[in-house]
Amino acid sequence: MTLVRRSQAEVLDADPASVITLLLDPEHTGGALTSNRTLLRDGNVGAPPHQHSRSGELFFILDGVLDMLVEDEVHTLRAGDALFVPPGTTHAFAPAAGHDADFLVVITPGKPRFDYYRLLDKVHVGEATWEQVGQTQDLYDNHYAESAVWAARHA
């Protein structure tokens, strides 16, 4: 058993438009899962289209409204909605226009991801670059993809 108290969770908030609370990584779960809580504020561009070759990803919306790309379709998720993205499925997410989105993410089986989120936090304070993030695609099983549907959403 692993219990993470709110006061023990690492909070990454260098990006003024998001807060990522690290909950569980494979080292805490015997490899079963990775989990975080993410708050994306209105106007945040969110996560670009990507896929995970070995892990599925569960999103549970705690509050607000989240737009989710799954392959070539955008879904709008609201508080209480859950969506599972299977391995190998292109997806992206961002708060819906005019809304914040607060959600729980569970990746299974677990893949060490805490350092990926820490790297993103470093980008926002100028200690790392987006190029360095791109170089970690195999390490963190986070493979970036193109999506005309998602690009049109932001146009």
Image: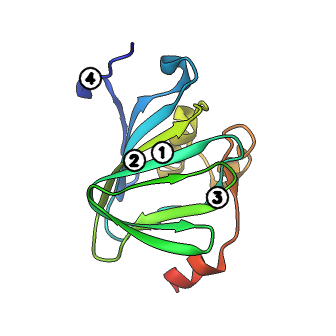
Secondary structure of the residue carrying tag 1 is helix
Q: Residues within 10 Å of mark 1 (few under 14, many from 20)?
A: many
For the question of whether residue 90 can be seen, the reply is yes
**In the rendered structure, are the residues bearing label 3 and label 4 in contact, judged by CB atoms less than 8 Å apart?**
no
| Nearest-to-viewer mark from 2 and 4 | 4
Disc 2 to disc 4, how far (Cα)? 22 Å
| Nearest-to-viewer mark from 1 and 3 | 3
Residue at image mark 3: 50
Q: Earlier in the sequence, mark 2 or mark 4?
A: 4
Q: How many marks on residues? A: 4
For the question of whether residue 127 can be seen, the reply is no
| Amino acid at dot 2 | Ala
Q: Earlier in the sequence, mark 1 or mark 4?
A: 4
Secondary structure of the residue carrying tag 3 is strand
**In the rendered structure, are the residues bearing label 2 and label 1 in contact, judged by CB atoms less than 8 Å apart?**
yes
Q: Earlier in the sequence, mark 3 or mark 2?
A: 2
Residue at image mark 4: 5
Q: Is residue 51 left or right of residue 84?
A: right
| Residue at 61 percent of width and 32 percent of height | 111
Residue 32 placement (x, y as % from top left): 54, 25
Q: Earlier in the sequence, mark 3 or mark 4?
A: 4
Disc 3 to disc 4, how far (Cα)? 30 Å
Which mark is drawn over residue 121? 1
| Residue at 58 percent of width and 22 percent of height | 31
Q: Earlier in the sequence, mark 2 or mark 1?
A: 2
Disc 1 to disc 4, how far (Cα)? 22 Å
| Amino acid at dot 4 | Arg
